Every structure is written in C-alpha cells, then in structure tokens.
Amino acid sequence: MIPDRLTFRWWLLICAISVGNIVLWGLTAWGLPWESDVYRSKQLVLSGLFVAACAFRSILPRVDLERLCLWDSPLSSVILGRSVATVAELCFAWQCALLLFKLSTLTGSPVIGTIGLTVLPIIVVAELACWFAVATLNNIGHAVEELLWSIMVALVAACLVIYWQHTAGAPPLWVPIGLIACAGTAVLILMVDIPLYITRWRIGKRAGLRYLRVIEGLKDAVMRRRVTQAHEDWRKEVLWMSLYFSAGVWVSLGIIFV
C-alpha cells in the first residue's frame, strides 16, 4: 500500500530525527566517564531507553485507543507499543526525579527533595490511567493521564525556580531553557492534548460507544489494529507525536548534562 504523500513525508521526518537522536545519545555515551560520575551514568542509561523507545514508536507509529497503525506489522501491536511507551515514560520520570534529588543536594532544599519523591508516583498513576483508556476505549483516561503529566511538569518548574533562587548571580543556561520547556509542555498538554481527548470522549458518548471491560480491552489491544496511511487519520496526531519524538527526546538527553 502506497501511503499518502504528506503522511509519508512526516513519517520520514520523525524517523530521521530518531536516527539523529540515537547518534546524539551514542556520542554522549562515548564521551561520558562512566566510572567517575554515577549520576550521569544513571541518566545516560535511562535516557538511552527513552531514546530507543521513541525511535521504535517513530518507525512504527500507532494511536492506541483508536487502534490505528501506519504499517501492517506484528510489531505494530497496540499492546506492544503501549508497553514500550510505559517503560520509556517511567524512565523519563525517573530522570526528572534524579535531577530534583541532585538539585536538592546542591541547594540543601528539602522542598526540592520532597517534590522529587512525588514525581515517579504521579507518573505511575498517569500510566495506569493511560492503560485504563487503552483497555476500555474511554478517552477520559487519557485526559487524566495528561493532567497528571502537567502537574508533574509544574512541580519540576517550581523546583527549577527554587534552584534559581539559590544561585548567586545569573543562573546556568539550562535553568531558563528548562523553564521554557516546562511552559511549552504545559501549554501543549492543557491547550491541545486534554481538549482533544475530551472532544473524542464527547463524540464517542454521543455515538453510543460501548466501553470495554479491562480484560476484554487488553485482548482487543493485542489482536485488533487498523492500518491506515490516510493523512486525515493522522492529522491530529502529527503535532504531539512530532514534538514528543523530537523535543521530548532532546530534553531527556539534556538532563544528562545538568
């Protein structure tokens, strides 16, 4: 099947970005003194898992709840893709937690350390909400997931501000960059992602969509997928996927050097 031209160009773009990200991670690993810096070594491993997962999801993109995939392959299974994404997102949350623990140590701020303890639990709940949505076909689960991610992002931003207040003179360049990244992510989640999922939930409700039981839905996610390359089917996914697999990965790589 020949894909829609726009869809194919977009797919080539995110694949090229993913290859570039793998190269960047490899160069980082090559130049990192593993034995002398335990913090960066942990960050490198976690970032590597995130980079690899995003590359996999770029090559074989799918939309979990709608059971859409770009290519007809067993590796396009929704359950496989969601499992890979879950591991990746937990690794990213772990990166953020490690960063906050580091900042807490550097500043002596117990507030940053306490917030760091909340990051991973928040994202664990977010992943459970996501799996609920994928299994039941209820987009409200995705909306809850995104809301929890926005809370986590706001907490990280608050810690960066606290760290900024503890620095003498001008802050390191990564601090304002991190705040800009947090602000951009929050805007994307609150203005694009959550409204999109709520709209889809309302459409499904008006159409009388039958929600699945969790076990039934997990079996459905293993077996069912709809292969499509039509631009109309992917149009609303392009923005978040493109930013996730590019800027999201760059944030993960950048945390290694903080």
Image (tube, grey):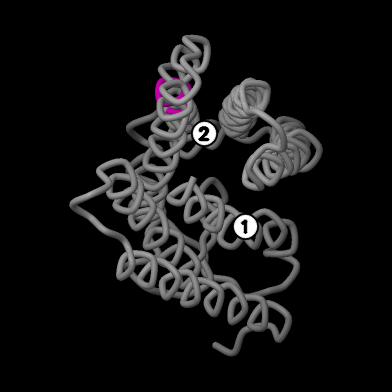
Q: Considering depth in this image, is 14 or 107 the residue closer to the camera?
A: 107
Residue matched to label 1: 247
* Callout in the foreground (2, 1): 1
Please report the residue visible at 57 percent of the width from the left and 26 percent of the height from the top. 152
Residue 172 is at least partly visible in this image? yes
Secondary structure, mark 1, is: helix
For disc 2, the neighbor class at 10 Å (few under 14, some 14 to 19, many from 20) is: many
Real-space Cα distance between discs 2 and 1?
25 Å
Find the residue positioned furthest to the front.
169
Give amino acid for label 1: Ala
| Labels in figure, total | 2
Examine the rendering and report whether any part of residue 207 can be seen: no
Observer-nearest of 175 and 147: 175
Quarter of the picture holding the N terminus: bottom right
Q: Nearer the viewer, residue 246 or 74?
A: 246
As drawn, 25 above or below 194: below
Q: Residue furthest bottom?
A: 2
Asked if residue 5 is positioned above or below residue 122 in the image, the reply reads below
Which quadrant of the view contains residue 191?
Answer: top right
Which mark is on residue 172?
Answer: none
Q: Which residues are magenta?
A: 119-123
Q: Residue at x 56, y 60 (%)?
A: 245
Q: Predominant secondary structure in magenta?
A: helix
Q: Is residue 79 left or right of residue 18?
A: left
Q: Please, what is the three-letter code of the amino acid marked with disc 2?
A: Ala
Q: Circle 2 sits on which residue?
A: 133
The spot of residue 234 in percent (x, y) is 68, 64
Q: Residue furthest right?
A: 191
163 sits to left or right of 129: right
* Residue 109 horizontal/vertical position (percent): 50, 13
Dot 1, how many residues are within 10 Å of its Cα: few (below 14), some (14-19), or many (20+)?
Answer: some
